[in-house]
Image (cartoon, rainbow, N blue to C red):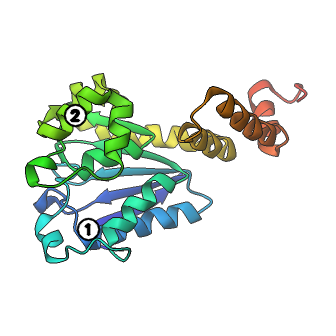
């Protein structure tokens, strides 16, 4: 694992921290490889239920390190950035981000794949792809209009104008704001609270939330399938007993 991506595990939470503060955590291809490795290891570790993403120093991330990318422009299947982008939508465990400072490009679009996002009040976000002669990535051309509506998404992506944490909250891109100094304490507390939930139910609920089943009737059937599986599980029986006491029959 790269020393520019620091990974630690505790209490069901895998914390993945970008650690290139002198470059505002601009992400290199080597860092993308380390991020993908961290997510894959977390996915394979049964003790991990939540991954918490954060950044060291003054920024969450300034986005891609363009000098690094321009030196290796081939976006083929072997490219580590491509591997990371393909890992995000398939990641089955809960993904939480703690965002602060200047957050640019992939730093914003990866939030669309997170299940919960906390942002420091001072956070400033932007997606300047078009300004740089590029196009959006990480599925943001689909996910952002779904979240904020077509016209607002067009303004954010076509103009690349910065927006602050309060605007991100009003658009539903973050769950809540924190004071800058409290960001990581609150993010870790949230991650631990999520990690304490029954894991099979937790992961099944994430899968349902991210499902591409587009009709109400289709989603009801998908939910019923998951509900039946949980109803017969020891996890359900143990949870009921924990909530209602040993005298309650399931």
Q: CA distance from mark 2 to mark 1?
A: 33 Å
Count how many numbered circles sit on residues in the image: 2
The residue tagged 2 is 154
Q: Is 229 left or right of 97, judged from the image as shown? A: right
Q: Is 77 left or right of 134, judged from the image as shown? A: right
Q: Is 171 left or right of 194, judged from the image as shown? A: left
Q: Is residue 146 above or below residue 62?
A: above
Image quarter of the C terminus: top right
Q: Quick one: 66 or 9, which is closer to the camera?
A: 66
Q: Are marks 2 and 1 in contact (CB under 8 Å)?
A: no
Residue 123 appears anywhere in the view: no
Q: Which of disc 1 and disc 2 is earlier in sequence?
A: 1
Q: Position of residue 57 (x, y in %)?
A: 17, 53
Using the rendered view, name the quadrant where residue 167 is placed: top left
Residue at image coords 16%, 53%:
62
Q: Is residue 44 above or below residue 136?
A: below
Residue 80 appears anywhere in the view: yes
**Considering the numbered disc 1 on the image, is that residue within a helix, a strand or a loop?**
loop
Residue at image coords 39%, 33%:
146
Image quarter of the N terminus: bottom left
Using the rendered view, name the quadrant where residue 183 is placed: top left
Q: Quick one: 204 or 46, which is closer to the camera?
A: 204
Residue at image coords 70%, 38%:
222
Q: Position of residue 173 (x, y in %)?
A: 33, 33
The residue tagged 1 is 4
């Amino acid at each position: 694992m790269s020393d520019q991506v620091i990974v630690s595990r505790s209490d069901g939470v895998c914390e993945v921290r970008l650690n290139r503060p002198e470059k505002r955590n601009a992400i290199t291809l080597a860092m993308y490889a380390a991020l993908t490795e961290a997510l894959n290891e977390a996915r394979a570790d049964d003790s991990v239920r939540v991954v918490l993403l954060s950044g060291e120093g003054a920024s969450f991330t300034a986005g891609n390190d363009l000098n690094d990318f321009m030196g290796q422009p081939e976006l083929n299947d072997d490219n580590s950035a491509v591997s990371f982008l393909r890992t995000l939508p398939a990641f089955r465990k809960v993904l939480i981000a703690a965002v602060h400072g200047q957050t640019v490009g992939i730093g914003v679009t990866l939030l669309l794949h997170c299940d919960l996002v906390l942002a420091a009040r001072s956070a400033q976000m932007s997606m300047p792809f078009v300004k740089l002669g590029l196009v959006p990535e990480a599925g943001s051309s689909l996910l952002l209009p779904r979240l904020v509506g077509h016209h607002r998404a067009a303004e954010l992506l076509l103009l690349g104008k910065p927006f602050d944490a309060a605007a991100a909250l009003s658009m539903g891109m973050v769950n809540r704001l924190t004071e800058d100094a409290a960001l990581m304490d609150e993010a870790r507390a949230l991650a631990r609270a999520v990690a304490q939930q029954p894991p099979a139910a937790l992961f099944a609920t994430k899968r349902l939330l991210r499902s591409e089943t587009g009709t109400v009737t289709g989603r009801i059937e998908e939910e019923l399938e998951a509900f039946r599986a949980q109803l017969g599980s020891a996890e359900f029986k143990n949870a009921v007993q924990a909530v209602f006491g040993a005298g309650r029959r399931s």
